[in-house]
Image (tube, rainbow, N blue to C red):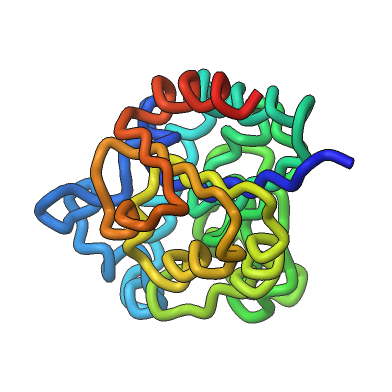
């Protein structure tokens, strides 16, 4: 029986593949207020802006390649039962070779009905256009969890995290809830490794080993520790 390695990942792991982190220091996302492009209100006010915004993000993801950090996580499957829980909406974990990936905040390469969230569609290209409809006749929207919406995958993520023998946090400062609460689901004897250049408050715990490096350099070091 392999030990269960649960990995929580965020924007920092994708940044080294050239995908910008969620928002800059000014709080803007690619020059937009996040509410304009990532909320039900923004969608109601300007569907064409929201569709174009995510079309551009999708195009960037399709052009990006998995980096060494993604690939090392896949390599760890030789030694552990690895489950990745990601806040990222790209598919770089899957393309990097990871077998088990749960997306907390949705998937950029999928669309869904704007009237029935269970109707989810794989996209063949990089665009969702105005007039692209689901089978119920409503406009397709990005399959993304927006601000103000429920995070339906948080409960399965909590159950998975609670089953961890080892917890790894990569490229996220875990500041955004509900994802930030996942680190508290692990048992008190479970070792936690954090790979992130910054130093979140939970580094003070004696459960936590901090590796204050980028995702790629940190994962190289961590693989030597874990294997």
Q: Residue at x 24, y 51 (%)?
A: 23
Q: Residue at x 27, y 36 (%)?
A: 197
Q: Residue at x 24, y 42 (%)?
A: 198
State the quadrant of the C terminus: top right
Q: Which residue is drawn at 31% across and 43% down?
A: 21
In the rendered image, the vertical position of residue 53 relative to residue 227, given as above or below: below
In the rendered image, the vertical position of residue 44 relative to residue 32, given as above or below: below
Q: From this viewpoint, is residue 120 visible?
A: yes
Left or right of residue 123, residue 41 in this image: left
Residue 41, picture quadrant: bottom left
Left or right of residue 67, residue 4 in this image: right
Nearest to the observer: residue 39 or residue 221: 221
Q: From this viewpoint, is residue 108 visible?
A: no
Percent position of residue 137, x then y: 69, 74
State the quadrant of the N terminus: top right
In the rendered image, the vertical position of residue 186 relative to residue 195, given as above or below: below
Count of numbered badges drawn on the protein: 0
Nearest to the observer: residue 110 or residue 164: 164
Query: Residue placed farthest to the left in the image?
Result: 26
Query: Residue placed farthest to the right in the image?
Result: 1
Percent position of residue 208, x then y: 43, 49
Percent position of residue 123, x then y: 66, 46
């Amino acid at each position: 029986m392999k030990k269960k390695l649960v990995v929580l990942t965020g924007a920092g792991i994708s940044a080294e593949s050239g995908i910008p982190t969620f928002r800059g220091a000014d709080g803007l996302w690619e020059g937009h207020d996040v509410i304009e492009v990532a909320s039900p209100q923004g969608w109601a006010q300007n569907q064409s802006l929201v569709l174009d915004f995510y079309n551009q993000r999708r195009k960037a993801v399709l052009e990006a390649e998995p980096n060494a950090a993604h690939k090392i996580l896949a390599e760890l499957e030789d030694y552990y039962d690895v489950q990745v829980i990601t806040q990222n909406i790209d598919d770089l974990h899957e393309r990097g070779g990871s077998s088990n990936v749960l997306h907390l905040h949705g998937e950029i390469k999928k669309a869904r009905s704007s009237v029935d969230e269970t109707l989810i569609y794989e996209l063949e290209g990089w665009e969702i256009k105005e007039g692209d409809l689901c089978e119920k006749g409503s406009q397709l929207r990005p399959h993304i969890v927006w601000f103000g919406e429920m995070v339906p995958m948080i409960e399965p993520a909590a159950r998975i995290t609670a089953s961890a023998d080892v917890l790894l946090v990569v490229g996220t400062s875990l500041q955004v809830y509900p994802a930030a609460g996942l680190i508290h689901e692990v048992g008190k004897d479970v070792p936690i490794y954090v790979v992130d250049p910054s130093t979140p408050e939970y580094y003070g715990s004696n459960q936590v080993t901090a590796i204050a490096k980028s995702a790629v350099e940190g994962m190289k070091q961590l693989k030597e520790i874990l294997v």
